[in-house]
Image (cartoon, grey):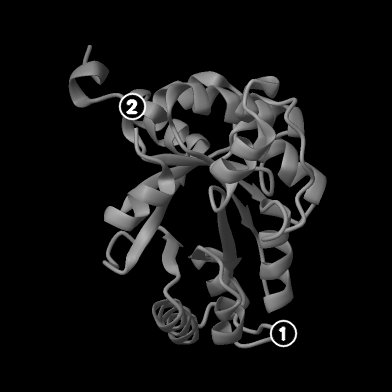
Amino acid sequence: MAGLREMLGAERAVGTFVKLPSTAVIDLAAEAADFVVIDREHAPLSESDALALVRHASALGLPAVVRLPALDAGQVNRLLEAGAAGIQLSTVRRPDEVAALRAACEYSPRGARSISLAHPVARFGAVGLRDHVHASAGAALVIVQLETVETDATYDRVLAAGPDVAFIGTADLLVSAGFDEDLAAERYDAISAAAATHGVTLGAFGRADDPAVRYLLLGSDLAMLRDGMTRALTPTPMQGAH
């Protein structure tokens, strides 16, 4: 199965947020999604939960990104060692945040990630040091979430710092705009234009209508469970007849 980076280079990839700690969700997602984003920002998933989900996804060949609310270099390292396809950092506002995430995802000299071979990706030491470092170079996707109408630097400067994906948090962006849909649309277009200028893949939540969006997230396991349960438990006229 192609990796997420290769997938994004060839076509649109469609994924969903995972908020439940069950590996059965990963089994189901592997049947329908191109990738999943394990959500440590809005879901009560522990790091142990996230690591287990990443490992299960990796075993199935399903790329699993992990969304974090703040940068924790140690946690990033452990998630990548478990096989995460990338890290999605929420509410990025400055170029230095992009650089810090990149540094946490890359070994020297490209970054500052700490090295170990005692983990699944290096087959617990079966892969040699040089081979592991070489194979890991540029492997992890650096994904920044842009979701505020005001930032500490322009969107252009943030994306000039070189993330792999600029993900537009459309709901947060609308709330940040005070539900001014025109302002939110203006900022959305500005982010899209900056991504195109700097060769950054554009991502967004729910924007299947935008052909520029290649990293597309739709719904979540919980939202789909609710929708499916509501449909299944709503009687049809025949079921309701006596």
Left or right relative to 221: residue 80: right
Left or right relative to 105: residue 73: right
Q: Is residue 3 visible?
A: yes
Spatial separation of the CA atoms under disc 1 and disc 2: 41 Å
Expressed as whole percent of the image width and height from the top left, the position of residue 172 reads: 58, 67
User: Is disc 1 placed on a helix, strand or loop?
Assistant: loop
Q: Is residue 178 visible?
A: no
Dividing the picture into quadrants, the one containing residue 115 is top right
Expressed as whole percent of the image width and height from the top left, the position of residue 179 reads: 54, 77
Q: Residue at x 56, y 83 (%)?
A: 155
Q: Residue at x 75, y 25 (%)?
A: 118
Q: Residue at x 60, y 82 (%)?
A: 149
- Residue type at mark 2: give it: Glu
Expressed as whole percent of the image width and height from the top left, the position of residue 106 reads: 67, 53
On residue 143, the disc is none
Which of marks 2 and 1 precedes in the sequence?
2
- Residue type at mark 1: give it: Asp
Residue lying farthest top? 242
Q: Quadrant of the C terminus?
A: top left
> Residue under circle 2?
31
Q: Is residue 139 above or below residue 110?
A: above
Q: Is residue 179 above or below residue 3?
A: below
Q: Residues within 10 Å of mark 2 (few under 14, many from 20)?
A: few
User: Is disc 2 placed on a helix, strand or loop?
Assistant: helix
Q: Is residue 2 above or below residue 101?
A: above
Q: Residues within 10 Å of mark 1 (few under 14, many from 20)?
A: few
Dividing the picture into quadrants, the one containing residue 54 is top right
Dividing the picture into quadrants, the one containing residue 235 is top left
> Residue under circle 1?
152
Expressed as whole percent of the image width and height from the top left, the position of residue 2 reads: 35, 39
